[in-house]
Image (spheres, helix red, strand yellow):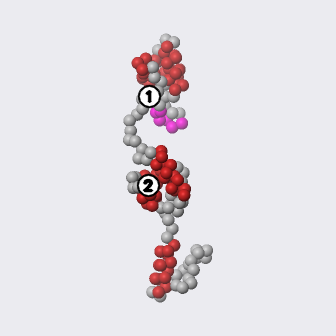
């Protein structure tokens, strides 16, 4: 496998590299010469050539793997739900999706779609806390611009 110059890691050979390897081998060059000229390793050149000779294929076979949890239709449905109600919590969206996937999965899909996921604010709890605190005789310091009012506390 060729090495990516930017990351220094191995990467899959491109179609252009594969075509070049096949053309050079068909022209009678050795695998060592092909490796030196193209930057594709000798072993990778041999694999590309063997794959071409036996199957006439330039592409790799489809790799096995676990299927996605949500189908494309379900992902679109999730996106629509999130856009219609931007204040909905992740747990709420998970329930609306029928509970087929976990809360973490819903959050991951939303992040991949570029949608914001944040915790819902709870101003009612803050008001209840202020009421309870003032009844107990404690003091409450509220910063300006917080939007909290003390009418009827």
Element carrying mark 1: loop
Circles 2, 1 touching at the beta carbon (< 8 Å) = no
The N terminus lies in which quarter of the figure? top left
Q: Is residue 61 above or below residue 80?
A: above
Label number found at residue 60: 1
Q: Residues within 10 Å of mark 2 (few under 14, many from 20)?
A: some
| Above or below, 116 relative to 145 | above
Residue 78 versus residue 8 in the image, above or below: below
Q: Is residue 10 magenta?
A: yes
Which is in the foreground here, disc 2 or disc 1? 2
Q: Name the outermost residue toward the top.
A: 28
| Residue displayed at 54% across by 36% down | 6
Residue 140 image offset from top left, x and y in percent: 52, 81
Pointer 2 or 1: first along the chain: 1
Write down the region rendered in magenta: 6-11
Q: Relative to 48, is 96 above or below?
A: below
The residue at 56%/83% (across/down) is 150
Tag 2 secondary structure: loop
Q: Position of residue 126 (x, y in %)?
A: 49, 75
Name the image quarter holding residue 91: bottom left
The CA distance from mark 2 to mark 1 is 36 Å
Within 10 Å of disc 1 (Cα), the crowding (few <14, some 14-19, many 20+) is few
Say which residue label 2 marks: 97
Residue 112 seen from this side: no
Q: Quadrant of residue 103?
A: bottom left
Indicate yes or no whether the magenta region holds residue 16. no
Q: How many marks?
A: 2
Q: What is the magenta segment's predominant secondary structure?
A: loop
Quadrant hosting residue 64 = top left
| Residue visible at 55% across and 56% down in the picture | 83
Q: Is residue 149 visible?
A: yes
């Amino acid at each position: 496998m060729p090495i990516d110059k930017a990351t220094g890691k191995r990467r899959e050979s491109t179609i252009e590299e594969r075509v070049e390897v096949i053309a050079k081998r068909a022209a009678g060059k050795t695998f060592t010469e092909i490796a030196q000229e193209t930057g594709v390793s000798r072993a990778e050149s041999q694999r590309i050539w063997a794959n071409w000779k036996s199957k006439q294929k330039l592409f790799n076979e489809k790799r096995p793997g676990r299927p996605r949890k949500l189908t494309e239709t379900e992902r679109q449905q999730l996106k629509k739900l999130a856009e219609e109600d931007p204040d909905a919590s992740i747990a709420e969206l998970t329930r609306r999706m029928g509970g087929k996937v976990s809360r973490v999965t819903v959050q991951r899909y939303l992040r991949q779609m570029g949608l914001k996921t944040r915790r819902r604010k709870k101003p009612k709890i803050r008001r209840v806390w202020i009421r309870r605190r003032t009844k107990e005789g404690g003091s409450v310091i509220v910063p300006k611009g917080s939007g909290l009012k003390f009418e009827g506390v």
